[in-house]
């Protein structure tokens, strides 16, 4: 499964967001976790979302339009090099979107498979649960670990973030395509309800 997409809109402030035209699926995760690479993999396009080794550069909400939904890339959290005021501003933008967007069907929370969830990952998870948002955790960069280690890490992530059976983590790799079909299934499932 795949689906071509294009960058539909960008927004720096909540009031710049366009009215929703389709159901939306949001992506959250710390900077550099692999959000852009996941977007490119889902779309089957290498150049759709910019991937970069400089974390924290994306400070806008990017909305990518697929056939059946809009994928909403929210600014990455937890980047130490930005000021506290800037982090607060990102927080307001991300939380404002997540709390108010009626078209939102599913939040994909990305975590790096190689590390235990960070404090920011845990806080984001708690926040999503508190606000009753349907969430699926995606463990990125699965190709960087051997199979056994990746599965161990997935169990650890599920335990530390207290995930229900249908909340992941999906082991995902933008390099090998692992997890792509599972992710598509979860997206289509969320769009059906
Ligand atoms: P973003 O900041 O969350 O959008 O992260 P990017 O998609 O730009 O990825 C950050 C870095 O991780 C880049 O150097 C990517 O090439 C690398 N990366 C992302 N996904 C994967 C993956 O699945 N496997 C490997 N090996 N590297 C990845």
Image (tube, rainbow, N blue to C red):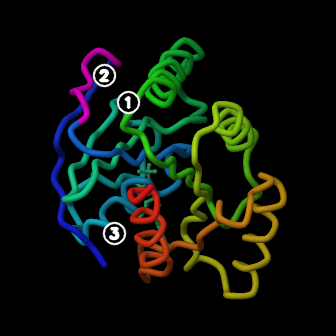
Instruction: Say which residue label 2 marks.
Output: 12
- Which of pointers 2 and 1 lies earlier in the amino acid sequence? 2
- Which of pointers 1 and 3 lies earlier in the amino acid sequence? 3
Q: Is mark 2 within 8 Å of ligand 1?
A: no
Q: Is residue 184 magenta?
A: no
**Residue at image x 44%, y 72%?**
185
**Residue at image x 35%, y 19%?**
14
Give above or below for 55 relative to 173: above
Image quadrant occupied by the N terminus: bottom left
Q: Quadrant of residue 85?
A: top right
Q: Disc 3 on helix, strand or loop?
A: helix
Closer to the camera: disc 2 or disc 1?
A: 2
Instruction: Say which residue label 1 marks.
Output: 59
Residue 120 position within the rendered picture, expressed as x and y whole percent measured from the top left: 69, 37
- Marks 2 and 1: CB-CB under 8 Å? yes
Q: Disc 2 on helix, strand or loop?
A: loop
Q: CA distance from mark 3 to mark 2?
A: 25 Å
Q: Quadrant of residue 170?
A: bottom right
Horizontal arrangement in the rendering, residue 138 relative to residue 53 (left or right): right
Horizontal arrangement in the rendering, residue 65 relative to residue 179 (left or right): left
**Residue at image x 54%, y 69%?**
141
What stretch of residues is rendered in magenta?
A: 14-20
Name the foreground residue: 167 vs 46.
167
Closer to the camera: disc 1 or disc 3?
A: 3
Q: CA distance from mark 2 to mark 1?
A: 7 Å
Residue 103 position within the rendered picture, expressed as x and y whole percent measured from the top left: 36, 37
Q: Is mark 3 within 8 Å of ligand 1?
A: yes
Neighbourhood count class around disc 3 (C-alpha, 10 Å): few under 14, some 14–19, many 20 upward: many
Instruction: Say which residue label 3 marks.
Output: 41
Ligand 1 image-quadrant field: bottom left
Name the foreground residue: 156 vs 59.
156
Residue 151 position within the rendered picture, expressed as x and y whole percent measured from the top left: 73, 79
């Amino acid at each position: 499964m795949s689906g071509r997409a294009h960058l539909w809109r960008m927004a720096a402030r909540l009031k710049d967001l366009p009215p929703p035209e389709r159901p939306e699926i949001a992506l959250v995760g710390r900077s550099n976790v692999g959000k852009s690479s996941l977007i490119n993999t889902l779309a089957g396009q290498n150049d759709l979302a910019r991937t970069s080794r400089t974390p924290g550069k994306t400070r806008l909400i990017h909305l990518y339009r697929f056939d059946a939904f809009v994928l909403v890339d929210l600014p990455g959290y937890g980047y130490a090099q930005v000021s506290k005021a800037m982090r607060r501003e990102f927080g307001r933008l991300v939380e404002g979107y997540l709390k108010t967007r009626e078209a939102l069907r599913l939040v994909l929370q990305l975590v790096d498979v190689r590390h235990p969830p960070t404090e920011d990952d845990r806080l984001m998870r708690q926040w999503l649960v508190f606000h009753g948002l349907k969430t699926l955790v995606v463990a990125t960069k699965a190709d960087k670990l051997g199979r056994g280690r990746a599965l161990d890490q997935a169990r650890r992530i599920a335990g530390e973030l207290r995930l229900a059976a249908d909340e992941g983590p999906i082991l995902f790799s933008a390099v090998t395509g692992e997890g792509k079909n599972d992710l598509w299934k979860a997206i289509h499932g969320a769009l059906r309800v």
